[in-house]
Amino acid sequence: MNDKLSEFLNIENDKHMGASCAGNALFVEFRLSMSTPSSSFTPDLSVSAAVKALGWVQSEREEAFVAWLQKQVLPHGLYPESVHSASADASFRRYFRVLGQNGSFIVMDAPPDKENCQPFVSIAALFASAGLKVPAILNWDSMHGFMLLSDLGAQTMMQVLTTSAAIDAAALFNQATDALVMLQKSSKPGLLPIYDEALLRRELDLFPEWYVSQHKHCVLSTEQLHILQQTFDRLIKVNLAAPQVFVHRDFMPRNLMVDSNDADQRLGVLDFQDAVYGPVTYDIASLMRDAFASWDEDVCLDVTVRYWEKARKAGLMDFEDWHSDFGTFYRSVEWMGLQRHLKVAGIFARLTLRDGKPKYLADTPRFIAYMRATCARYRELFPLSRLLDQIEGSSAAVGFSFGRV
């Protein structure tokens, strides 16, 4: 393997662990040294060998990827020999990073029989028109599900928050809520699927189906089922009453990218293909009640209050007394968060039991804790709190904190 390419790939791996300065310096050196067209650059590592290292279930798909990647070399100045794994998510999509003469690029691998890329393409254009920093789609092979994207950086907001002791977390959350309000201000009905009662109920039903029945092997009694359905009805009623806006549906630090070279200090936004038109409370609940990390309650309150102030100025809080009373707004945020927690617990169980991805279920205790904390604050949710204790086979002391009961 070419020494510079080998060293660059090692540095790229280090960057994912939080070390970026040395990688950036070497990247510049490597890029400047590759002044000849990529078609004439022949390092020891062949394109086919680099692609094979990515791991393919079907040889036909591997061959199609090689053919497609080679077609991108001249138009975009790629060095296809540098392609390597960048990340994967809970879906069947995978992401690779490939070096180019003027920077790096991201490649999406989304098998069309398992993933529909059209929503990603359409919503990318919609969110870009709203002013958000999203990946530019440079090439899309819709037949095979390969896509070449601009690279928004190697560090997520989550990585920065958890690996850097000197980071200004408040500044990052401020950038995140700036992006969220910008998105919500641009909202128009009829452009995205509606987050209606049917969808809310389908999501909630994942909890008894996959978490309670399949994962916990718990058979609910008629009374317990009644409590669950009564709670679902209340959650749906509260959430549908909220003002409707564009909803990302996974607006959390893992899907927000930090680029220190961006003069505007904007966070990149990823994983938006499931966006809908729904409750204004959803994305702020996602941001502060993360699937993979928990923030202190005072942090959650502080960020949510600051978001509320921005949203008020943008005219997004003109509903009931939300404009003047943060408490009533925050109650709806918590109830929206509870709907999401129930849904995600079911999804994580399904990912483990159906899709063979057990790492997600390890975060379920975080969601049970979120649910219990919310239920403890509102009398209407006390029955769900007791039901959760029965499902989990434990009892938890009921505590009270801020919020309305």
Image (tube, rainbow, N blue to C red):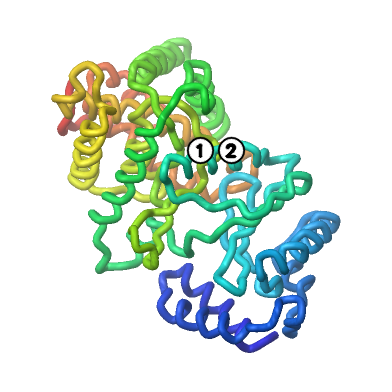
**Residue 39 sits above or below residue 64 on the image:** below
Identified at 33% across, 48% down, the residue is: 176
Residue under pointer 2: 122
**Residue 254 sits above or below residue 6 on the image:** above
Q: Nearer the viewer, residue 232 or 65?
A: 65
Q: Residue furthest right?
A: 60
Q: Nearer the viewer, residue 113 or 372?
A: 113
Q: Position of residue 379 (x, y in %)?
A: 23, 18
Contact between labelled residues 2 and 1, with CB atoms less than 8 Å apart: yes
Q: Is residue 218 visible?
A: no
Element at label 1:
helix
Element at label 2:
helix
Identified at 62% across, 62% down, the residue is: 96
Which numbered tag is attached to residue 126? 1
Q: Does residue 387 appear left or right of residue 126 in this picture?
A: left
Q: Position of residue 326 (x, y in %)?
A: 17, 29
Q: Nearer the viewer, residue 61 or 313?
A: 313
User: Could you classify mark 2 by the number of other residues whose Cα lies within 10 Å: few (under 14), some (14-19), or many (20 or more)?
Assistant: few
Look at the image and tell me in which quarter the C terminus lies: top left
Q: Does residue 153 appear left or right of residue 147 in this picture?
A: left
Identified at 51% across, 41% down, the residue is: 272
Identified at 73% across, 42% down, the residue is: 112
Amino acid type, residue under disc 1 in the picture: Leu
Amino acid type, residue under disc 2 in the picture: Ser
